[in-house]
Amino acid sequence: MGRVLDFIEDYRCVSIVGICKNAGKTTVLNKLISECEAAGISTALCSVGRDGERNDVITNKEKPGIFVEAGTMFATTTGLLKYCGAATEHLLSMGIGTPIGEVVVLRARERGFVQISGPSTNARLPALIDFFRSRGAEKVLIDGAVSRKASVSPSVAGCSILCAGADYDPDISKVVADTAHIAVLLCTPGLRDRKTAEAIICTGRRDIALIDEEDNAAVYDKAGVLTKAVRIQEEHWEKAVFAYIPGAVTDRVCGAVLRNRNTRALLSLVTDDASKMMISRDANALLLSRGVRFQTLEPIKLACICVNPHCTTGYPDFNKKRFLCEMRAAIENGAAVNNGDAVGTPVLDVVTNS
């Protein structure tokens, strides 16, 4: 299968997210650090949580540390400085407080293990990424927090890597099916109709906006009260061909959409980006059967999916070959049915390079 670096070479900022704890994110991060070093590419690291500890702070299970070469920049917090095994140079104090101290940026003076952290919100990450780039980082690698997809937002990262591990569930079929569903959501296609996108943007993107075939708009507040209508019929939901949803797209939101819409005509639900897509497999299947599709104002690039067959919860490890083969088949088959943009997403095991 080759290097992980081959799948992200066109992107300067990469977010690594997992479907559960111990999904293999740190292993992928270390693999990328090593491959970038071998290719002569300077890297910078940060996390929207905490990574690099030798024992998980929640489960106390042993996990891989993060090993960096001299010259690598990384964000951490003042409370984690004592765990850095390499001599460092202080570059920046960000003035951002966390439960484990202020966020600071360091440069490793020598090879060694480090612990990384960083801003926990999307709003603060771009400033950190810009600083890394201003100091010469060619690749910025972000460790995304477990069960949070905010760091995959296009406002933060150019592309993302999704990690799936056996710790998610002892049933390999459930891990495969749920990972394929998440991948399909992350690959939600961008809205190609620029006139419609402009009509949505003109509403302010704070409330639900319904757009008809002629780009007329009706805007509802979060309580479902019509606040603005521009040349659109009273049967707004029946006439709409696009519906912009601010915030997270959840099962509850989608249920409300179906209750308001009796027709089976095609409707595209539009959100800012796929990090807001949080619907279940069952809800997605129901929406597809009712003619509802999803689009985003800013699409996400899913570079690859990495699988980790090792289980730390006491259940047997997954069969490596079966896990890899079934995941590849699920991505191809499920994506073809639900969202063609996910077809062809590479699936690999970084430990075996397969």
Image (cartoon, grey):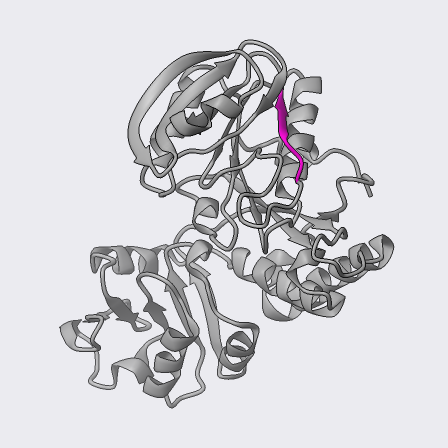
Vertical side of 228 occupied by 327: above or below? above
Q: Position of residue 298 (x, y in %)?
A: 42, 50
What number of labels is visible? 0
Residue 192 in sight in this render: no
Q: Position of residue 97 (x, y in %)?
A: 30, 34
Residue that sits furthest to the bottom in the current view: 262
Q: Is residue 150 left or right of residue 208?
A: right
Q: Is residue 69 left or right of residue 12?
A: right
Q: Is residue 38 left or right of residue 271?
A: right
Q: Position of residue 213 (x, y in %)?
A: 33, 72
Span highlighted in magenta in the image: 63-68
Residue sitting at x 40%, y 69%: 269
Return the residue nearer the eye: 86 or 120. 86
Vertical side of 187 occupied by 131: above or below? above
Task: Identify the image quadrant of the C terminus.
Answer: top right
Residue that sits furthest to the left in the current view: 227
Task: Identify the image quadrant of the N terminus.
Answer: top right
Residue 328 in the magenta stretch? The answer is no
Vertical side of 271 occupied by 99: above or below? above
Vertical side of 108 occupied by 125: above or below? below
Residue sitting at x 35%, y 43%: 121
Q: Is residue 103 left or right of residue 34?
A: left
Residue 67 in sight in this render: yes
Residue 67 in the magenta stretch? The answer is yes
Residue sitting at x 55%, y 17%: 72
Residue sitting at x 47%, y 52%: 149
